[in-house]
Image (cartoon, grey):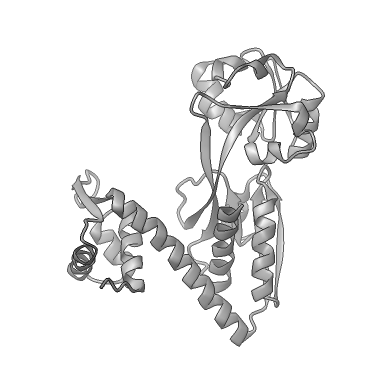
Amino acid sequence: MIRLDRKHLALVCAIAREGTMTAAANALAVSQPALSKQLTQLEEMLGTPLFERTGKSTSTGQTTMRLTRPGRAFEQRARSLLEEFQAFETTLNTRVGGASGRLRIATDVIHNDAALARAMRAFASDHPGIELDAGPEIAPLDALTAEKVDVAIVGEAPTLSGVAYTQLEPDELVAVMRADHGLAAKAHVAPDDLEGQEVIYHLELERSILHRRYLKPAGIRIAGFHRIESPAGILAAVADSDAVSVLPRRVAAASPQAASLALRPIGEDGYWFHWHAARRRTDSRAEIASLIARLAASGAAG
């Protein structure tokens, strides 16, 4: 009979996250031999290897660990269970201790607020003494590191010292144009198709994913650029012009103008990404972990 406990879930997640046994052992505050023994026992219990050793890192000289296919499935479920367990612990502690205060959430300007609203309702029911304050920010990670907010919801997860990320719901960036636009006849929009097009975006062009990953590398010149911070404003402008924009599919599909718009994948395979909840590593408040766990659960549900 297989009997798993919390340490089994934690060790697999730590090894997958850190990439080496040494780093994972340090993160878990155990010795490397003890961690190796625990992993071996777990793999023997399950009857399958969870990791494969892929050689030594050129920078650290340590053997790198990569999840096997069964290991990926185990790690994904383990991560979810740990988040749920932590949220449950927080709920119990809150009800006993009556935590109070205020948490500030910064979202990317183009984030779909539906999942956030579900998470906030779920959080509020178990944390009645904590006020939630959420709003869009042009640079949510800057607000987080400056300690202006407690959690940031972002579409990219760049490596930043002192910032930890939790993966949320998947989404897709799509090209958005009027349904009778010339590009709407295409199955997908390639970077070259934007040559000579008028573009509307929510950031300055040089800061955008569109510019960094598509326009600049290919040397594509657009006919004109307009910045509108609000997704609703972007969609209204696109619906009333020949301009093209790039927005998450969920945002564009839920807009009042959706029936008059065409949404096309960027590239043949589309441009898929995950939203992430970011927090400061030094912020160990249980309420933060509880909120992020609910954000993850709400995104999966929606």
Residue 263 versus residue 87: which sits nearer the camera? 263
Residue 221 versus residue 238: which sits nearer the camera? 238
On screen, residue 193 versus residue 223, left or right, reads left
Which quadrant holds residue 18?
bottom left
Q: What residue appears at the point 66 percent right and 56 percent down from the top-left corner?
A: 116
Residue 279 versus residue 294: which sits nearer the camera? 294
Position above or below: 193 against 42: above
Q: What residue appears at the point 47 percent right and 58 percent down from the top-left corner?
A: 162
On screen, residue 260 versus residue 4, left or right, reads right
Q: Residue 266 at what x, y percent from top left?
A: 56, 26
- Numbered marks: total: 0
Position above or below: 160 against 194: below
Q: Residue 240 at what x, y percent from top left?
A: 82, 24
Which quadrant holds residue 181?
top right
The image quadrant where one finds the N terminus is bottom left
Q: What residue appears at the point 56 percent right and 69 percent down from the top-left corner?
A: 290
Q: Residue 27 at what x, y percent from top left?
A: 33, 65
Q: Judge whether residue 141 can be spotted in this image.
A: no
Q: Residue 222 at what x, y percent from top left?
A: 65, 16
Q: What residue appears at the point 67 percent right and 16 percent down from the top-left corner?
A: 197
Q: Judge whether residue 175 can be spotted in this image.
A: yes
Instruction: Please identify the residue farthest to the bottom as the structure is shown.
Output: 96
Position above or below: 101 against 240: below
Position above or below: 19 against 8: above
Residue 282 versus residue 40: which sits nearer the camera? 40
